[in-house]
Image (cartoon, grey):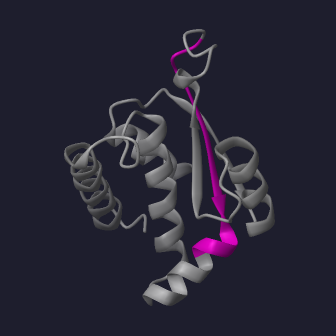
């Protein structure tokens, strides 16, 4: 996982950046989602960008936190007929994109399309290098 995360950071032009990755179950991610985002349900990935907080300027190399529900990732992989690790690494990449400034929820369609294009680009890179 560290190698994949590092390759994603390299592809985004921030190889020295740091982030926290937490792997949790549906119960834990539901609590996080409810307490921090006001959504009382489990989700696949949540990210918290350090730069969005009041201490974001202290160390710009610390990007933030990515929290992935292994339960939801497994369920989504099964539903899509894809390998678990493929889905898991896609969610990791998605979360990292969020903490590096990409957004598909609060921005318009153009930003969502830009994020989706970057996801396709980086995921193809990971697959091409045999990391997924």
Q: Is residue 89 visible?
A: yes
**Residue 33 sits above or below residue 36 on the image:** below
**Of 34 and 102, the residue lying toward us:** 34
Q: Is residue 1 visible?
A: no
**Residue 129 counted in the magenta span:** no
- Horizontal side of 48 relative to 12 (left or right) equals right
**Of 124 and 22, the residue lying toward us:** 22
**Residue 62 counted in the magenta span:** yes
Whole-percent x, y for residue 95 in the image: 50, 49
**Of 122 and 68, the residue lying toward us:** 68
**Residue 89 sits above or below residue 97 on the image:** below
- The residue lying at 27 percent from left, 63 percent from top is 124
- The residue lying at 58 percent from left, 13 percent from top is 59
Whole-percent x, y for residue 68 in the image: 63, 58
- The residue lying at 48 percent from left, 44 percent from top is 96
Whole-percent x, y for residue 78 in the image: 53, 88
Residue numbers of the magenta segment: 59-73
């Amino acid at each position: 996982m560290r190698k994949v995360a590092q390759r994603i950071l390299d592809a985004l032009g921030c190889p020295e950046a740091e982030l926290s990755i937490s792997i949790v179950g549906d119960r834990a991610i539901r609590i996080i989602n409810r307490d921090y985002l006001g959504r009382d349900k489990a989700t696949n990935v949540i990210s918290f960008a350090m730069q969005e907080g009041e201490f974001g300027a202290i160390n710009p190399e610390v990007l933030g936190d990515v929290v992935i529900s292994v339960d939801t990732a497994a369920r989504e992989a099964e539903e899509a007929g894809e390998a678990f690790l493929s889905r898991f690494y896609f969610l990791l990449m998605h979360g990292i994109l969020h903490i590096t400034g990409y957004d598909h929820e609060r921005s318009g369609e153009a930003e969502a399309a830009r994020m989706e294009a970057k996801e396709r680009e980086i995921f193809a890179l990971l697959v091409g290098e045999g990391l997924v």
